[in-house]
Image: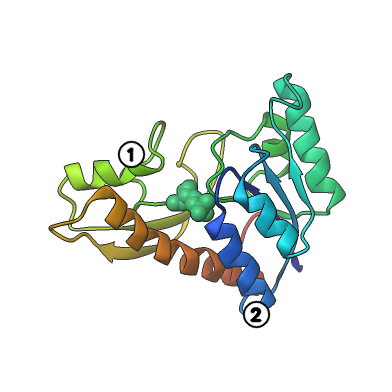
Amino acid sequence: MKLRLGFLASHGGSNVQAILDACREGRLEAEPCVVISNNSDAMVLDRAMEARVPAFHLSSHIHPDPARLDEAILATLEKHRVNLIVLAGYMKKLGPKTLARYRGRVLNIHPALLPKHGGQGMYGHHVHEAVLAAGEKESGATVHIADAEYDEGRILAQKKVPVKPDDTPDRLAERVLEVEHQLYAETLQHIARGDIKLDGL
Ligand code: GRF
């Protein structure tokens, strides 16, 4: 079955961009179908429009009732016939209806080697600060299935980077982000090829 990707992202969307590029260049056999952001001024919406992918701002500003927001997100994904959700720096939780409809078909990327350094509050620079504080010799990126809990679903793929003695959170973040861009597209291609099997695909 051809992958039909629906992205949710809150900010810059460099991971979304890497995946859009991989699709355009034929390294990833998948169709980017829709991009949704909870921030109306997120750069990811511009990136989507540039790539001629439908882009929507859906947030609690538009739908203050969380149940309505959940329904609006689900309706948007279904309207664009998305069969796999790609979370890429999405700072909100998916609602129960969307999660139930797409259970096992929601991917997330985390900027550390899960199961270490994940969970509530572990996002952005907090992750890299924790990795440095723990004295880790290596970090990396993890693509995993997202479920109702933070960062706890099945791990699909990881890529490692070294932690250097003079690293700052920013320097480490930059090194990790580079491998995130490779890892997300590669993992999606493994799914597209059937090398990684997901329930319901
Ligand atoms: C990435 O570090 C990702 O691991 C995390 O959020 C960041 C998103 O970056 N979940 P971008 O918006 O894709 O540039």
Q: Is mark 2 within 8 Å of ligand 1?
A: no
Query: What's the mark number on residue 178?
Result: none
Q: Give the position of the N terminus as an image quadrant.
A: bottom right
Of 55 and 111, nearer the camera is 55
Amino acid type at circle 2 is Glu
Q: Is mark 1 within 8 Å of ligand 1?
A: no
What's the residue at 53%, 58% (across, down)?
Answer: 14
From the viewer's perspective, tell me whether residue 181 is left or right of residue 111: right
- Which one is earlier in the sequence, the residue at label 2 or at label 1? 2
Amino acid type at circle 1 is His
Q: Give the position of the C terminus as an image quadrant.
A: bottom right
Vertical relation: 11 (above or below) 190? above
From the viewer's perspective, tell me whether residue 69 is left or right of residue 136: right
Q: CA distance from mark 2 to mark 1?
A: 34 Å
Q: How many marks?
A: 2
Q: In the picture, residue 127 is in which quadrant? A: top left
| Residue lying at the far top of the rendered structure | 65
Q: Which residue is mark 2?
A: 25
What's the residue at 78%, 25% (across, down)?
Answer: 68
Q: Residues within 10 Å of mark 2 (few under 14, many from 20)?
A: few
Of 186 and 55, nearer the camera is 55
From the viewer's perspective, tell me whether residue 154 is left or right of residue 43: left
What's the residue at 19%, 52% (across, down)?
Answer: 136
Q: Which residue is mark 1?
A: 126
